[in-house]
Amino acid sequence: MREHSHPYLHALWLSTCLTVTCLGATTDGVVVPNGDFEKSASDGKSPEGWTVGIAPNTKATIELDPAVAHSGRSSIRLVDQSPTQPFIYAVIHSPKITVRPETTYDIRFFARATNATGCSVGADLDVGDVCRENLPVGSYDWQLITFTVTTQPDETELTIHFLADGLTEGLWIDDVSIAASPRQIAGLSEVRYPKDFSGPFPRTPDDLPERLLVCDATKLPDETYRWVVALEGIVNRKGPRVYLINKVAHEPGIWVDEQWLAYMKQRGYTGEEERLADPEELVRRFRDEIAGLVVFDPELPGSINASWMLAGLKNCLPVSPETAASLGPRLGLRVVMDLRGMWKRNVEAYRYVYDRYWDQMCHHVLAWQFPPSRRFCTQDYLVEFKVFQFWVSNPDDKEKGGDPKAEMAFAHEILANTPANIPMMGWVGGDDPKYVWLTEYTFSHLVSEYGKFIPGSDLDCNISVHSAFRPDGGLFRQKSRRQPSAVKLENDKAYVSFSIMEGIDALNYWQGYQRKMWADPQRGQAPMGFGMNPMLNDVMPLVQQYYYETMTANESFFAMVYLNEPVYANRFRKSDRERIWSEWLRSIGDYCRRLDMDGVEVCWSGVGRRNLPADGILGRYCRALPEIDYLIADCGAGNRATIPSDACASLVDGKVVFHTLNHYHVWSANENMNAWPMDRENERTLQEIQRLLPHRRPAFASTVGTSWVYRPSWVADLQRKMPPSLVLVSPRDLARLYRESRNAGAGNAK
């Protein structure tokens, strides 16, 4: 019996908001110092109390403008003449504002713009993270904007900032205020439901048949491809019977699904498949399992997401009106639901499904899905397990039916009314960047606050088949841990590990792009670490089996899951939050034991903080995971200002903790990563390592390269270019050598 039955969920949501609002009512008098920008600093150009920051090589200004104001005498004006690129920005921060912990605030201000792009408003939180929201693009007169942020447990101060990160002729801000929101979303009780499966993902039952039915979807029209994927999900509920060759390739013409089908047969999981040239033959084969058609409204994007959900609920195929008119009569499929004209706004479509069918849906998986996306390949799994999927529109695209504020409010509601430690499938990005309102980091902040992690699954293929595999656990043993290392500690050396972390936490990365890296002929020549999402073991264990079977002793896998640790589960009350964290860490420990992993990558801890005490994020992991030997505390050196090089290696509760020494060379929309030359990048990386290494010896540093550029051959080249004083080692050896050095130092001290 779950804690709260569905008819009461919405009432629970409202009552919780009202209850917490009363507790936070005394915060209405919060003041933003000089929020009207009427006082100038001694230079006469900047507002008193506010701090301006212009990144190096950024052609931008932030100044008071006495000629333009919403009220009073002046506003601030941001001008940015630099195109969007890494580490190029201009920002202005407010003075610190005293706030109450676990309280939702509305930050209100007036904005006006001339040809603005890439601008945002944000709140800097004392956990070292930022909550941020994009501002409208283009040109517009003064308009009131409300930005909502919830403070973290124990947080008593925050600062507001305005950022220009793209070409902007002028952005004016005036009359900034802050007050407790009438709708409080903090201190929540976790809503829990019974579970009939183990692990974080439901899995397809039964083994693979001797002959899979295979349909090549790579040349199908999109509207045919749509219903074929849904059919796969419906049919595979009873066991993995249908397999698609999806429109996903990691190299031109090399289809991911063909490669994994060949591997299934090679390992004896299935025999020679039966290929069906005509997708309609699938309907004829499984006609008794298909109830009919759900017709979506082409004029309302939200109805597309609703059609996928209703397809799973009613065993129907989601189709456009044109497809329904042709496919239905030809195959004898009736229209079970016609969604045209049912709703005026996207959020109404989501609300309709939620209010009427939530009891019949999966309560332990959610999906953030861009409705017009043609990335259908993951929908077999979402349809199979009746996963709720939704989206928040971009206010700038003027999409019909879009109501971003209402959609965001609904997103908060469903995030609050679902359990923690569950996956948020899909992705914040759409097929076209113009449709994306939330940035990746705002998205991860939002879902992490509600205890959801991001598996990176928007290009996963055939999960309704892959999740049925149950490989022998003995296959998952790392060769790097089965033989002693030849690397010895020398007191005049600096030891460096090099790991691929950014992007590689995504499940779809391992199914596709990693095959390209794995085919590098120089793989295995140099030691490398890889941050692997351990949940591959649930979703795509066959894929994981392949990498374990083919890894060399120079490759190491450590656990890495994308979530924002400093804010994880912070929307929930303390008792629930502690239990959620305990369950999360227990799960990670189980994966590490099962997968022979002795390290964990914590993506976000350490950002904005000099060190994390034993009772912080690092301490949680180190104390709770006896299975691990080391922790990598961040993905890149975004915290270099707060963690100096000589503090990038330490012991926390007996575990070796590394903060990443270098930046990975990030990409932006105006760069072509495929054109980056190896020599240039390795020279830059080597110079950065040598510049940032501690002066004392022996020294120890964990470094990183971006997954979209670095290959094993690049790392082998980097190793060859290292001077004799630098030694490239695995992350595991780096931890061992650091521990030996500490032990030797302790002995000498005695």
Image (spheres, rainbow, N blue to C red):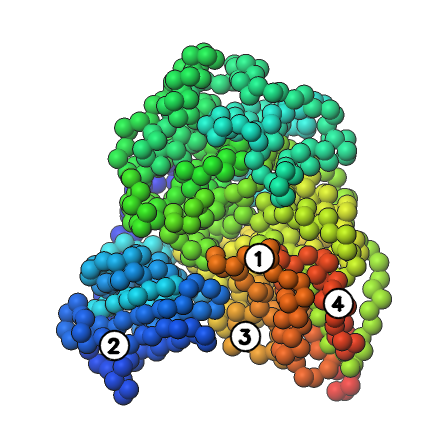
Q: Residue furthest left?
A: 72
Inspect this view and state whether residue 186 appears.
Answer: yes
The numbered mark, 4 or 3, whose residue comes first in the sequence reads 3
In the image, taking residue 180 as reference, residue 624 lies left or right, namely right
Q: Nearer the viewer, mark 1 or mark 2?
A: 1
Q: What amino acid is labelled 3 in the image?
A: Arg
The numbered mark, 3 or 1, whose residue comes first in the sequence reads 3
Give x and y (percent) for residue 311.
44, 27
Residue on which the image places disc 1: 673
The numbered mark, 4 or 1, whose residue comes first in the sequence reads 1
Q: What amino acid is labelled 2 in the image?
A: Leu
3D distance between C-alphas at marks 2 and 4: 51 Å
The numbered mark, 1 or 2, whose residue comes first in the sequence reads 2
Give x and y (percent) for residue 719.
75, 67
Q: Which mark is residue 64?
A: 2
Residue on which the image places disc 4: 719
Dot 2 falls on a residue whose secondary structure is strand
The numbered mark, 2 or 4, whose residue comes first in the sequence reads 2
| Quadrant housing the N terminus | top left
Q: Nearer the viewer, mark 4 or mark 3?
A: 4
* Disc 4 crowd, CA 10 A, few/some/many (<14, 14-19, 20+): many
